[in-house]
Structure formats: C-alpha cells, structure tokens
Amino acid sequence: MKEIFKITMSLTAVCIAASLILGFVYAKTDHARKLNEERTEQKTIQGLLGFGADEKAPDDLKIFPVYRYVITSPQGETSLGYVLPLKGDKVVLVELDLSGKPIRVLPIDASISSLADQANRDNIINGALPKGSKSVWAQTIFVADRGGKRLSYVVPGVIQGFKTFIKLMVSLTPDFTVSGVAVTYSEEDPGLGAEIQKDFFRNQFVGKTLDLIKKLSVVKEPLPADYASSLDPVKAKQKGLTAEQVKEIKAKHLNDDIYALTGATISSRALTKGVVNTVQKFVKRLEILDEAIRKEQLSIAF
Amino acid sequence: MNRNVQLLWNGLIPENPIFRLALSMCPAVAVTTSVQNGLMLGLAVIFVQVFSSCTVAIFKSFIHPRIRIPAYVIVIALWVTVIDMILPVISPEVYKQVELFVKLIVVFAIIISRLELFASKEPLIPSFFDGLGMGIGFLFGLCLIGAIREFFGTGQLFGFDILGFNPLLIMVLPAGGFFVIGFIMAIFNWIEYKLTGKIPTSGGAH
C-alpha cells in the first residue's frame, strides 16, 4: 500500500516539474513566436503577390485586411460581420444575415492598423455590437490594392491533411484566377507529403481559372517532364528555358488536372481540395459582400 | 581507448542504431528520400537524445523504478516540445527547415532505449557521450540511406542534379527504403562475420 503512494507521488512530481518547465518556456517564447508568425505571414502574402527579395513591392501597393466574424444575437440568430476599411482610415462593421441581406452598418472607433492584434480587435468588435451579442473571429482576407484598383485577393484556408491540418493561402486575381498557392502550416511527412510545399507541386494551381478550379481533381499519373521543369523556376533555369518557352509549356498543360505526388496521394488530394474549397467559398462570399457594399453605398478603401 | 571516445565510436559503428540495433526503423524508411531530410532529422535526434540522456542521468534517483518508462516518455516529450518552442524564437530560418522533423521525434525507440539501457545506470558524463554517439550514429545512418536513395532514385545529391535522369525510381518509394536498409545491414553483418568469424545473431545487440 505504501509502495503505490510512493509511485503516485513520484509520477505526479515528474509531471508537475515537466508542466512547470513547459509553462515557463511557453510564457517566455509566446510573444516572440507570435511576432515571428506575423512576419512570416506578411512575407507569405508579399510572396504570393509576386514581391520578394528580388522584386520590391511598389510604394502605392496597399494591403487591406478584411475580418470576418460570426455573430450570435441575444435571440440566438446567427449573422456574419465583415470589418471593412473605409476611405480616410475609418472602419465599419457590416452585418449580414445568412441569406446575404445587410442588417446594419456599425461604425468602429479605431483605425484598421490598430485592429491587427486579435485580442484587442475582439474587444472592440464586441463593444460595438448591441448588448448580449457574441462574436467570434472566423477568417481574415487580404485585399491588395494598387492605385485604387484591386490587384489581388489573398485568402487563407484550412483542410484536413494526412496527419493534421494543412493551412494554406491562395492568391486570386480580380477575375478569380489562381495566381499563387502557399502552405503556411502542415505536419505532413518529410520526403512524402511535405513535398506539397515544393514549387513544382504548388505552381500546378497557378493560372487555373474559376471554371477550371470548380472541376479540378487529382490524377495519379507522373508529372510530364517538360511541365515539371517549367513549374520549378530553378529547374527552368538549369534547362535553359526562356520565359517564353515556360509560358508556352504552362499554357499547354493549363487544362490538366493536378498530378499527385508519388507516395503522397492523400496529401496531394488534401491540398487540392483545400484550394478548391477556399476559392469557391471566397468567391461566393465576396459576391454577397460586394452586393451589400453597393446597397449600403459604402466607400470602402479598396 | 578513452571510455568517452569509445562510447562515441560505439554509437557510430559497432552499435549503430539503425544497422546494428535495428531501432527506429520507421523514420529511417519514411524520411530518407534525400540526404537533406536525413541530415535534418539526424540533427534533431542528436539534440533530443543528448538532452534526454543528461536529464535522466541527473534525475535518475528521483524516478521510481516502477514508473521509469512513463517518466522517460515525459522527459523526451518535454525536450521535444521545448525545442519546438525555443527554436522558432532563436532562429526562424533553421526552424522552418527542421520543424517537421522535430515534431516527428516524440517516441523514437532509439531514444527511450538509450535512456533505459544506459542513462538510467550511468553518471552524467558517460551518458552525455553515449547520447551524442547514438545521435551521430543515427545521423550517419540516415544520411547514408538518404544519399543512396536520392542518388539512385532521382539522380541528385543534396538537390543538385548529377545524373540528369532517374536510374531507379523505386529507390525513392517506401519499398526502396527497405531494400537499402536491408543491404546495408547485410554488409554490416558480413563485416562482423569477417572480423570475428561468428555469424551475427538476428537484429543486433538488443
């Protein structure tokens, strides 16, 4: 009997010591990690828009976030809230019911840049809503604007992968053609599923129009050699392909489905499904939102 | 030979985790489609193995022998999580490369077996060198398998095109991993047979 107490105490002590250490490390690193994540997110967005180390983003490029909230009224009805930046650094919350009809437009007393921090933003949004309503953040969409014209949308998405969730970002041109796909978080197996992050796989989505995306599927066929070398900029350089040739090959394969990775069909299907779902949902939501903006005659920033 | 050097050498060849002890074969097959992958996983394992071995060597008197295995699992999980939290702060670039590999480690057989067989009986300094030796041995094994598979499977090494064509695609598929490990293991056993004249028992030391 005494033995079992000793064992219990010993294991409890080990667990408590471990959790204390973990708690301490978490508290110390949390802030820095969040900052890093934000920086990576900004970098990913810039990369998707085609700007990076070799090509500086132009000065008149502005990236506006649009926050989507799910709002529950005191009566238990669900509605959607979009936090939109207006011209002149003002912010409004547009509340839509589930069929897409605007319910009301609430002014938010804060600048859009001060809403980047989620805890702060949640507080402000909850304060602006009528008493008893609850709101939960759902998604942040980024709209890139250049000289008053929409340049592209960057939409995050999430899908079940092989082991856990795959988080991704899709950039779309104003006519909903995919201009880039990035994997921001995944735990797929290195050497197998993790290859979804490689250029030759991600770039297969680039150039697909909305119609193609709608019926996109995955084929278990080897990637054609000429297509493979045109998808990977490094390989294209090695093979000495000119920009013209790359364009030509890509155009030839534009209507192809996504070629699955060898030994990682589940991950390939997951990313494809993620991109398709993200794009389709976004297009529908944007249609409703643009309609509401027109009805309410808001002068939004982008 | 100095005992610490002996321990390092022991982990590298005579008791190589993959080819002699036949432990942690699962990651050795799954991850090693390229040298780069093998290198990254090997580095991650070295860190976790050394830290866990040292922790257990220091605190072994506090751990009740009847619950040592759960305690070891907690120690390993602790170090994996701590590395996973600290590394992105110290160096986001490195973390981006090894992120997936660190998370794979939690219950590798090799780590817990070294804690059970070595660190729980020996003092700190030998445990450190044993952990380091085993880690380096694992790294060596992964890199060797990775190099063979990458070279024959894709005609590349470290991502650089060498042959320009794929001689044997099967090498990058999971089946190729079993072939390569099997052949290297056979070579190790053959060398042992030549040196000692004894036919090696199956698997290895344990």
Image (cartoon, rainbow, N blue to C red):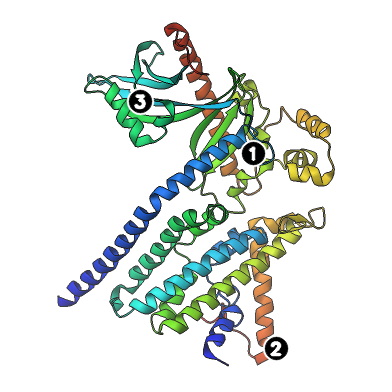
The percent position of residue A38, horizontal first and vertical second, equals 48, 41
Tell whether label 3 touches label 2 (CB within 8 Å).
no
Which image quadrant: the N terminus of chain A? bottom left
Residue A52 bears which disc, if any? 1
Q: CA distance from mark 3 to mark 1?
A: 34 Å
Which residue is labeled 3 in the image? A70
Place of residue A10 in the rendered image (x, y in percent of width and height, measured from the top left): 24, 72
Q: Is residue A267 visible?
A: yes
Disc 2 and disc 3: Cα gap in Å? 72 Å
Residue closest to the far left: A1
Q: Quadrant of residue B155?
A: bottom right
Q: Residues at marks 3 and 1, common chain?
A: yes
**Chain name for mark 2:** B
Residue A83 image position (x, y, % from top left)? 41, 22
Relative to the observer, which residue lies in front, A159 or A64?
A: A64
Residue at 64%, 64% in the rendered image: B178
Q: Which residue is mark 2?
A: B194
Mark 3 vs mark 1, foreground winner is 1
